[in-house]
Amino acid sequence: MPAVLKAPLVVEFPFTRSLGPVQSAFLTGLRDRVVLGVKTGDGRTLVPPVEYDPVTAEEIRDLVEVAPTGTVTTWAWNHEPRRGQPLSSPFAWVLVRLDGADTALLHALDAPGPDAVHTGLRVRVRWAEDRVGAITDIACFEPYDGDPAEPAGHSGAFEDPVTGIVAAARLDYTYSPGRAQSAYINALSERRNVGERCPSCRKVYVPPRGACPTCGVATSEQVEVGPGGTVTTFCIVNIKAKNLDIEVPYVYAHIALDGAGLALHGRIGGIPYDQVRMGLRVEPVWTEGGRFPDHYRPTGEPDADYEMYKELL
């Protein structure tokens, strides 16, 4: 029985967002070692602040400073910190109601072990050495047995306020293809394209999914397709990806391999980007040791007639 295929994959992108006046003041305050909340119409102080009252949905802008000390309301111990978390050694996730606030703030608590953490524990903010206007300006909380800190009554007005943030979104996971895709990947290592035929509609799907997306029935009959194919549609890429050593502009296309009932994706090379067109006949180009085609290039054949591939757009 073939070995189960698996591979580590990462999906990562920077998420950029602008800040309204409330969030701008909150993050700018953290940069300046000030914790701000927002006061609702009925007198509650919300930390972290929000722009609309969660009860009445009314817009709220009344900023008020709270203390950097507070009380743990609930907690959970993190035995194995992950990449990007606040601390590299085991710590507690805690909800802390800061003195002067009516809601709790989620952050990390630096404690020697779970026995040192309990609901009602008094804590204080440990500020990061380098602060930029982000929630990470609070490095973590730490146990504190002193008197509650007294806020200075900051108005929430700052010079050079933070107006936007960039948050890196990242997902690390291990992908394992099923039977159908494993056969497809193994065939690619032999420089072959293998799809599966639906027993009902008789379409051949490449890459195969193990079931027909049209009829919903299982597929098992393997069919070798290609190697040549037809460009059904395409786009011109003008933004360079940091993990691809490909100069822009270049063309990424849907390619219907000969004998396939579904177009797959591939890069088009060997031709100026502005000469790529629908109907262009192409063939795969393999690199030494490559497990899949590096790109597709023109075969020199006449373009395919639109009627031959219109159902594959």
Image (cartoon, grey):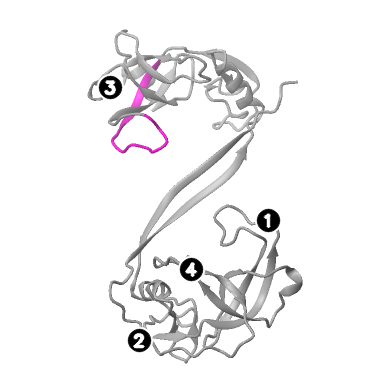
Identify residue type, mark 1. Answer: Glu
> Which of labels 3 and 1 is toward the front?
1
Q: What element carries label 2?
A: loop
Query: How much space separates mark 2 and mark 1, taking CA atoms?
Result: 40 Å
Task: Give the residue at mark 3.
Answer: 276
Residue appearing at x 58%, y 22% in the figure: 185
Question: Mark 2 or mark 1: which comes first in sequence?
Answer: 1
| Quadrant location of the C terminus in the rendered image | top left
Q: Is mark 1 on a helix, strand or loop?
A: loop
Task: Give the residue at mark 4.
Answer: 128
Query: How much space separates mark 3 and mark 2, taking CA atoms?
Result: 60 Å
Residue 230 counted in the magenta span: yes
Q: Is mark 4 on a helix, strand or loop?
A: loop
Task: Specify start and end residues of the magenta stretch as a single range.
Answer: 229-245
Depth check: give the residue in front, 310 or 46.
46
Task: Give the residue at mark 2.
Answer: 155
Identify residue type, mark 4. Answer: Ala
